[in-house]
Amino acid sequence: MRIITIAVLFFVSALKSFAQVEYPYPSHFLHLTIENKSLQMAYMDVSPDKSSGKTIMLFHGKNFNGYYWKNVIPMLTEKGYRVIVPDQIGWGKSDRPDLHYSFQMLAENNKVLLDSLHIEKVAVLGHSMGGMLAVRFALMFPNITEKLILEDPIGLEDYKTFVPYKSLEEVFQKEKSATYESYKKYQQGYYPEWKPEYEQYVQAQAQDLQSKNFDAIAWNNALTYQLIYTQPVVYELKYLKMSTLLITGSEDKTIVGKGYLSDSVKNQHGNYPVLAQQAKQQIPNCTLIILPGVGHIPHVQEPEKFKEAVYKFL
C-alpha cells in the first residue's frame, strides 16, 4: 500500500509539474510568409484604460515566451501604454519552422506586425535574447524606435570568442534530451535564491516537452542557439541613436554555452555588472541601473524595483 501511495503521489506531482499555463490576455495571429513557408505569429495586444497615445513592444528571451510578461503588461498599461507582446516565430504559440534564423528576420517580422496594427512609433523592451533582438530592431528601424530598454540582455560579449563551437547536430542531441528537471535546473541559475512562484516559468517552457512534434521543436531550439552564437550585436552598440535604459542584476552570471566551459573560463565571463558598464560606454545615450542582489530576470525577481526603473525612464 505504501509503495502504491508513493507512486500515486509521484504521478500527481509529475502532472502538476507539467501543468498548462494560460497566457494572461487573448492571443492574436499575424500571417507571414518566410522562405516560402506560410506561418502564423502569435501576439498579445493590450490597450490601457486611459491611453497616453504611446506603444511599447516586449521581446522575450530564448527560454521564454510571452507568458512571462504577465506582470509587466499591467504595469505598462497603468502608465497609458498600449502593450504588444509577440511570441517570436520559433517560440511559444507561434509556428516553429525549420528556417535560416537571423535577428534581422525576427526584427522584420515585428516591423510587419507593427505595420499591420498601424503603429508608427514604439518603445522596445527586450530581455535576455530579446535584448539582442531589441538592439537589432533598433539598428534596423531607428526612426520608429523611440526608446530602448535592455533588461539583462545576453550578447554583451561575443560568445564565439570563448565558447567552443558545437555543430547543429550536437546541440540538437542536447536539446532533444531535455527534461522538466533539466529546464528547472537551468532556470534556477537565473536567481540568487529559488522561490516556488518561479515554477510557473519552468512550466511555461516545459509545455514543449508534451508536444508530439518535440523533435522538431528541439531542432528549432538548436537553430536558435546557433543564432545567438553566430550573430553578435555587441560590436554595434555604438550605433544606437535612441535613449536607452540598460538594467541588469548584480548577480547575473548568464553565459550562453556555459555548460561547455571549464570553471576557469566561466569565471572570466558572464560578469554582468562589468559587461553592462562596458556597454554603457559604447551606447551614446545610455542610462545604466544595476540592481543589487538581483539575477537574470529583474521583472520576475524584483518587480517593484524593475517598475520604478522603467517608470523613471519612460
Image: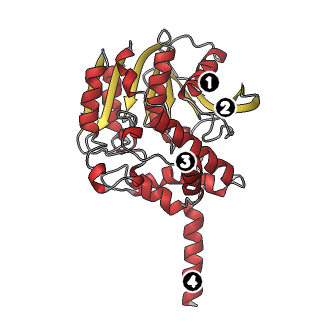
226 to 113, vertically: above or below: below
- Cα gap from disc 3 to disc 1, whole angstroms: 27 Å
Q: Quadrant of residue 292?
A: top left
Q: Quadrant of residue 251?
A: top left
Q: Residues within 10 Å of mark 3 (few under 14, many from 20)?
A: few
Q: Are marks 3 and 2 in contact (CB under 8 Å)?
A: no
Which residue is tagged 2? Answer: 41
Which residue is tagged 3? Answer: 167
- Cα gap from disc 4 to disc 1, whole angstroms: 51 Å
Quadrant the N terminus occupies: bottom right
Which residue is tagged 1? Answer: 109
Q: Secondary structure at mark 3?
A: loop
Q: Position of residue 304 (x, y in %)?
A: 33, 37
Q: Are marks 2 and 1 in contact (CB under 8 Å)?
A: yes
Q: Secondary structure at mark 4?
A: helix
Which residue is tagged 4? Answer: 5
